[in-house]
């Protein structure tokens, strides 16, 4: 995964992009080619069952191909809200925004290891209007320990820039 974390003074931007190997990309394109061949045979012989099967095959594999070739996950965090969006190349999902009440908590869900290093999917949690915990967003792609620590530093910086400098060295706990 390729992770980019930016801080512009108001927001923390987290971009996660899958890095598919060359062999993986060739395999995905081969599976799509097989689906296109099946579709061509179905159209040439006018076999409706084969056309329907290949359409389902291509729709599933098409989204999978777009995600692995051009996919990107974007999370924007500020002190009041958390927004997220997925990009599939030419198709972009609408930006969803959730309000952060009281505090933002980041929980970790272990994901598959990459190059022998542990990776985690992030679960962003806050409180709803009734002060009950709720999940705001769960990342589809994983981050490493170093990237997680960098994200935590950027979020702390986002909140601490609004604190008076003489109180900056006080210990603060972030959930």
Image: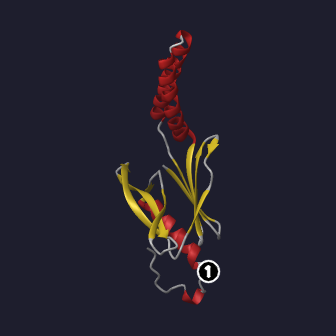
**Rendering quarter of residue 79:** bottom right
Q: Residue at x 56, y 11 (%)?
A: 44
* Secondary structure beneath label 1: loop
Task: Count residues near mark 1 (Cα–Cα under 10 Å), then give few for <14, some for 14-19, many for 20+.
Answer: few
Relative image position of residue 43 (x, y in whole percent): 56, 14
Name the residue: 36% across, 49% down. 112
Q: Is residue 14 left or right of residue 27?
A: right
Please identify the residue farthest to the top as the structure is shown: 45
Q: Quadrant of the C terminus?
A: bottom left
- Rendered view: 63 above or below 80: above
> Measured from the top left, where is residue 61 in percent x and y?
49, 32
Residue annotated with mark 1: 162
Instruction: Name above or below for residue 51 compared with residue 132.
Output: above
Q: Is residue 124 visible?
A: yes
What residue appears at the point 50 percent right and 37 percent down from the top-left corner? 64
The spot of residue 142 in percent (x, y) is 44, 53
């Amino acid at each position: 995964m390729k992770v980019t974390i930016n801080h512009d003074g108001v927001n923390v931007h987290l971009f996660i992009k899958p890095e598919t190997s060359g062999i993986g990309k060739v395999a995905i394109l081969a599976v799509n080619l097989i689906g296109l061949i099946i579709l061509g045979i179905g159209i040439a012989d006018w076999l409706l069952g084969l056309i329907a099967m290949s359409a389902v095959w291509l729709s599933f594999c098409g989204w999978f191909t777009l995600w692995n070739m051009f996919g990107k996950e974007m999370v924007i965090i500020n002190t009041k809200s958390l927004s997220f969006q997925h990009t599939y190349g030419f198709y972009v999902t609408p930006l969803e925004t959730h309000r952060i009440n009281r505090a933002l908590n980041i929980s970790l869900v272990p994901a598959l290891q990459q190059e022998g290093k542990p990776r985690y999917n992030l679960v962003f949690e806050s409180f709803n209007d009734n002060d009950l915990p709720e999940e705001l967003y769960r990342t589809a792609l994983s981050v490493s320990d170093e990237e997680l620590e960098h994200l935590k530093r950027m979020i702390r910086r986002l909140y601490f820039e609004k604190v008076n400098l003489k109180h900056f060295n006080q210990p603060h706990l972030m959930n």
